[in-house]
Image (spheres, rainbow, N blue to C red):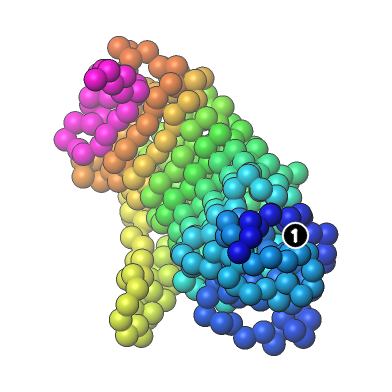
Amino acid sequence: MSAHRQLWTASDKDVNLTSKEFVNYKACGSFKGDYLQLCSLAGVIPHPCILPALRTAPSGDVNSSATLSHNASRYDMKDGDRVNVSNHVLDPASLALLLKALSLNPAVTALDLHNAGLATSAVAAIAAALPTTALSALSISFNPVDDDTVFAKLLADGTALRALTLRGDAVASAGAAALAAALEANTRLAALNLFANAVGDAGAAALADALLVNTALAGLSLARNALTAAGADALARALRGVAAVAPGAPLLARRAAAELRVVVHNKAAAEAARKKKGGGAEPQLLPALPPAAPCEADGSVRVAGNRTLAVLNLDDNGAVGTEGALLLLEAVAGVERGALGLKLLRLQRCGADAAAIADAAARAAADSDLQIVTSPPPPRAEQ
């Protein structure tokens, strides 16, 4: 055995997965085994993050065609349920083969692409391939792209995603609005992490509006997103609800469409549970939207706020200030006892005066199990 030198470089090959050898490829039952063989078919050196080389390996030129049919002893072939590519360019050829291998191996349920140099086209390719995989958790972090609206494609119909992390991807108001539109129609995603983007007040308002008709999302992070009191007010409205909605208003039509989606989703989930013969997690059943309540003689109705969001993280939005914090806390305090779904509200480093919001925070947390975090914990004493 001799020391193995890592000679991988990004490939400029155009991998055609519709060619005969790929169409006729038979899965071997191992993600890494399939990825290795697909690389061999394509004449591509396996990506070092997807298929790490062992510290020692048989001698030979890893760039030669002979070793591309690779004996697996050269690589760490231990499979897991997560693939992680961090701080290393993921070139188009490697990405295409990775997605093909994922489609053949439902045991892999999580993909983490951190600072991988992804372009808009790469994110679109991932979105197109998602319905063929069993991925339930996807993290694409610190991969800013030219078109931030492309991330919304990750929430299209047919995916099994339950958690989507888009930290540091330069998502601005347009991207947030696209995500909000996708989120409104999505019945699966439970967690959305948008930490360290540029969503701003307009993006926060779009996401807040989607929360009025979404009953699947349980966790939302808008930490460090340049929100001000206006963005906080939009989110407060999503939690508080709308006092008077006129007959024929678009919100009522959107609610009707959302109610139908919940019925369709739950029917499909129940049917899947009936057919299931054991193993795996139970399908998720969505709660119905709270019914709208008549409030005016002219037929206006009161629309309740979101009741399923459990975690809202607004840390590090310094311009929210005391005004924005009070708007949120008063909205939460005004929700009927027992109806609030929120369990954790984070408002650290939001520019609010702790003394000025103390009473409102106490009222918001009274008679509930809501935890409100407005200041970081004290430093630990040295031992």
Residue at disc 1, secondary structure: helix
Q: Quadrant of residue 197?
A: top right
Quarter of the image with the C terminus is: top left
Question: Is 367 one of the magenta-colored residues?
Answer: yes
State the residue at coordinates (49%, 20%): 318
- For label 1, the residue is 92
Instruction: For label 1, count other residues whose C-alpha is less than 10 Å away and answer few (under 14), some (14-19) or many (20+).
Output: many
Q: Answer yes or no: is residue 191 visible.
A: yes
Q: Is residue 269 above or below residue 347?
A: below
Image quadrant where one finds the N terminus: bottom right
Judged left or right of residue 111, residue 13 is: right
Which residue is painted at 73% across and 56% down in the image? 8
Region rendered in magenta? 358-383
* Residue type, numbered disc 1: Pro
Residue depicted at 49% across the width and 44% down the height: 193
**Along the viewing direction, whichever of 17 and 152 lies nearer the viewer:** 17
Which residue in the rendered view is the most extreme toward the front? 1
Task: Report the front residue among 148 and 84.
Answer: 84
Q: How many marks?
A: 1
Q: Establish if 313 lies above or below 47.
A: above
Residue 22 x, y percent position in the rendering: 72, 81
- Coordinates of residue 81 in the picture (x, y in percent): 46, 64
In percent of width and height, residue 336 lies at: 24, 40
- Asked if residue 42 can be seen in this view, the reply is no
* Left or right of residue 382: residue 148: right
What's the residue at 20%, 38% (across, down)? Answer: 368
- Relative to the observer, which residue lies in front, 106 or 224? 106
Name the side, left or right, on which 360 lies relative to 94: left
